[in-house]
Amino acid sequence: MGPKDIALLIYLHFLPHEGLVKKLCNYIETDGYRFYCEMSGRSALYKLALALREIHPGSVALVPDYVCNVVYKALELAGFTLRFYSLDSFFEPRPEELKRLLSDQNGGILLTASLYGSSAFIDQFKEEGWQKIIMQNNIHIVLDLCQDINLIADLPTNLDSNLSVILSFNDKSFPGVMGGGVLTKVCLPLTTQRMRINQLISLYGMLYNKIKGSIRQRILKLFPSSIKKDKHLHAVELATKHFEYSYCKSFPYKIELLRMAKIQAIMAVIGFSKLDDINRKKLHGLMSMKGVLKTKYYQTSPYVVIMADDDSISKRKRKLPYAIHNTPSQTLRHGLIIVHNKGFDDFI
Ligand SMILES: Cc1ncc(COP(=O)(O)O)c(C=O)c1O
């Protein structure tokens, strides 16, 4: 975050909350789908799932067997029973397996997610054959696009009200302090419960750390000799944690329904306005990396999979593979090398 961003951030604080939400919706809403702001992607999924349990038949959620565990937590909290399908080496569902699982499912959810640039099955959903299966079996498709907001330009809107999309503003497509929402034709109640003052302070604390990190990064660029120390710290941190797992225990990671804070909306509005520039920087970042797994949307993904560890990624920040649901010490994807390619200052 540079001085210009900080000036814009201060200026946007003078706008009313509703005005900021409206600006945000203008970036996202399309084809009669309405955007509901929430405090995080996980809370957005929880909110949608709660509503679907009320108005949609079926309580089974078909989910990928490898995804961020908060997805499983949010669905279970809302009362869904999980049924897993596998992903191939490009993090795509296997069509035959999905067809088989869907053939004996009436109602319920099929959640697909974009992971490290994978497609979330968007192209297949646009095909007549898949549309027929979904409509006939009354399946509600939940597209989890939390990892890459850019995919909203490609939505399978032919699924009409059988489609909802989950978005996250949490430092993936642009800098953020959590925040997210649901894009849907399902009528959802507005989340009105405001955050408490200590919760707001904790969000501003996250923002403060970002600004501090940004300044530090600039200093490190000017005095590269201090970088070694920084890299060492990161290596120690990675060595103590094997897989990514969220216990969702405390704010802002807990799954709860709180109105999106003004600062979250502001960060997202700034983020959308800079999306093209950020995407250009991602392309630039990719040019210096070898062996990137070419998933469908790898060019805009904040994380990419590398097929063989080498010098070209030695300075890149790593992301840990996701742990298995309820088993934080294990993963289905041992040895996966995932690196950040965010296109903006990235230090949290
Ligand atoms: C695929 C996927 N879905 C959902 C989420 C949850 O988003 P949030 O962190 O905004 O709650 C994440 C977060 O990392 C994610 O990667």
Image (spheres, grey):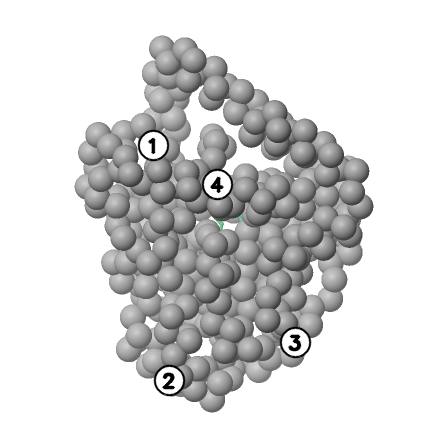
Q: Are marks 2 and 4 in contact (CB under 8 Å)?
A: no
Question: What kind of residue is marked 3?
Answer: Glu
Secondary structure under the numbered disc 3 in the rendered image: helix
The residue drawn where x is 68% and y is 29% is 7
Residue 2 visible, this orientation: yes
Characterize the local packing of mark 1: few (<14), some (14-19) or many (20 or more) Cα atoms within 10 angstroms.
some
Secondary structure under the numbered disc 4 in the rendered image: helix
**Distance between the Cα atoms at labels 1 and 4?**
20 Å
Q: Position of residue 71 (x, y in %)?
A: 49, 58
Q: Which residue is mark 3?
A: 54
- Name the N-terminal-most of marks 3 and 2: 3
Q: Which residue is mark 1?
A: 316
- Of residues 101 and 209, the one nearer the viewer is 209
**Distance between the Cα atoms at labels 3 and 4?**
41 Å
Picture quarter containing residue 119? bottom left
Q: Position of residue 79 (x, y in %)?
A: 58, 69
Q: Which residue is mark 2?
A: 129
* Quadrant of image for the N terminus: top right
**Distance between the Cα atoms at labels 3 and 1?**
45 Å
**Which tag is nearer the camera, tag 3 or tag 2?**
2
Q: Which residue is mark 4?
A: 277
Question: What kind of residue is marked 4?
Answer: Asp
Give the side of residue 9 with respect to residue 213, left or right: right
Question: What kind of residue is marked 2?
Answer: Gly
**Distance between the Cα atoms at labels 2 and 1?**
42 Å
- Name the N-terminal-most of marks 3 and 4: 3
Characterize the local packing of mark 4: few (<14), some (14-19) or many (20 or more) Cα atoms within 10 angstroms.
few
Give the side of residue 70 with respect to residue 25, left or right: left
Q: Position of residue 149 (x, y in %)?
A: 50, 54
Above/below status of 106 relative to 298: below
Q: Position of residue 137 (x, y in %)?
A: 47, 86
The residue drawn where x is 47% and y is 72% is 156
